[in-house]
Image (cartoon, rainbow, N blue to C red):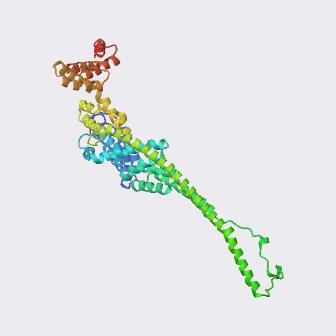
Amino acid sequence: MKCYHCGTQLSGGTTCPKCGADVSAYKAAVYASNAYYNRGLEKAQVRDLTGAVESLRTSLMYNKNNIKARNLLALIYCEMGDVVEALSEWVISKNIKPEKNIAGSYITRIQSNQAKFEATTQNIKKFNVALAAAKDGNTDIAVIQLKKVTTQNPKFIKAQLLLALLYMQEREFGRARKCLNTVLKSDVNNTFARRYLRELKGFESSKSNEAQDSFLPKHRQKNIESQPLNGNDVIMPHSSYKEPSNGAITIINILVGALIGAALIWFLITPARYKGLTNDYNQSILEYSEKLSNGNAELNSLTKQLQDVTAERDALNEKLQSISGVDGNNKLLTAVIDAANAYIANEPTKAAKYLVDIDVSALPSDNAKSLYNTIAAATTATAANELYNTGYSNYAKGKYSQAVEDLTVAYKLDSTKVDAAYYSAKAYVALDQVDNAKKYYQYIVTNFPTSRYISEATTYVSTH
């Protein structure tokens, strides 16, 4: 352990042997940080990733320079699917300890496999889209996006938990349980997964009780009055039937009965039967018409949903094209990482140049935005001055193309530099690029109305 003040190796005392600084509190913080690191390592070995993250974050709260804790935290983030957060931790680790730090090899390994890195970045973007859709109540879109994310990366714990929550909301308990079990395979003690499972058991038990109640047998009271009569209660009437005395009369009666039966069939039963068939046919036509109408309505609904999803896909593709290079690499994150490496190598101007064309709002995570802001705050002012001096020197020597490259970047880095805008315009005039010259003169007219260049700028803008 080294002194925080002078870097001298500390002994067993409470003061530094070289500078005399009181290191008792510092030692206590370092010991606590190491203890929480060991605890996080033990939890990570048994795949208690959530507990490991909490212990490692506590370790870094006590000692932010604990490189082992930071690198292990980044590895756990990778295992949980949060690659951007892992990269942020490794870049910070590399910044704290540039030499002999395994974080550098992890960063290089991720950057070398651009296809996998791009796929992971797209998964994170899809998760953010799904999260926004879920917040807006668009459950269908959220589920579609989350299914894609979890198919590509089943270990993405945040996506699995959100998908399980949406399934529970839609009362698809079997699918929700499958997502939660997948989470627990990667993170055996995930707090949210276990809480959702407990809620899921409550939903399923209540549903089971309702089903049992609905099938309980209903008791019937015996109706004593409906009991059948026995033989003693029945009064048998005397029969009035007499056998006919003549056989011819019997034959005639049979023929007459047959004729009457045929007439009844022809006039009563047959029309009723045909009428029943006609009614059945008409009812069938009516049912098929209703089904066809419902099918058309459902088709129109699905067509509208398809159009909405297609529009959303086109919008996402357009946004993706704005932040991705021609080879499909995510140039925003790559530029931030390159800027971080340049800043670690003590090249602030080079780092600022990587950041100059990045739209910070388009970065996929808060950690990437935080890293961008940290590097920008430390480099832009120095880089703007250096680039302005270099550009002005080239302008004075008549090297207008080189001057434009440095002066325009200097103005982008520091929009308060009216001199950078002015000499950019002058260099473009010398290069006979009227539109670019007019643009930078317009900056002066709009943003610097009290500068000494306002008269020249106003005249050029109004005459060109």
Q: In this view of the protein, which residue sits in the foreground, 337 or 178?
A: 178
Residue 429 in which image quadrant: top left
State the residue in front, 446 or 54: 446
Q: Is residue 148 above or below residue 464?
A: below
In-image side of 237 versus 134 (left or right): right
Residue at coordinates 37% horizontally, 34% vertically from top-left? 361
Residue 185, percent from left and from top: 40, 56
Report if residue 32 is visible in the image: no
Image point (80%, 83%), residue name: 241
Q: Residue at x 75, y 84 (%)?
A: 250
> Residue 357, image x and y in percent?
29, 31
Quadrant location of the N terminus in the rendered image: top left
Residue 307: where, in percent of width, then height?
43, 44
The x and y percentages for residue 234 are 82, 79
Q: Nearer the viewer, residue 322 or 235?
A: 235
Quadrant where the image shows the C terminus: top left
Residue 417 lies in quadrant: top left
User: Do we see residue 185 in this rendering?
Assistant: yes
| Count of all numbered marks drawn on residues in the image | 0
Q: Is residue 404 above or below residue 30?
A: above
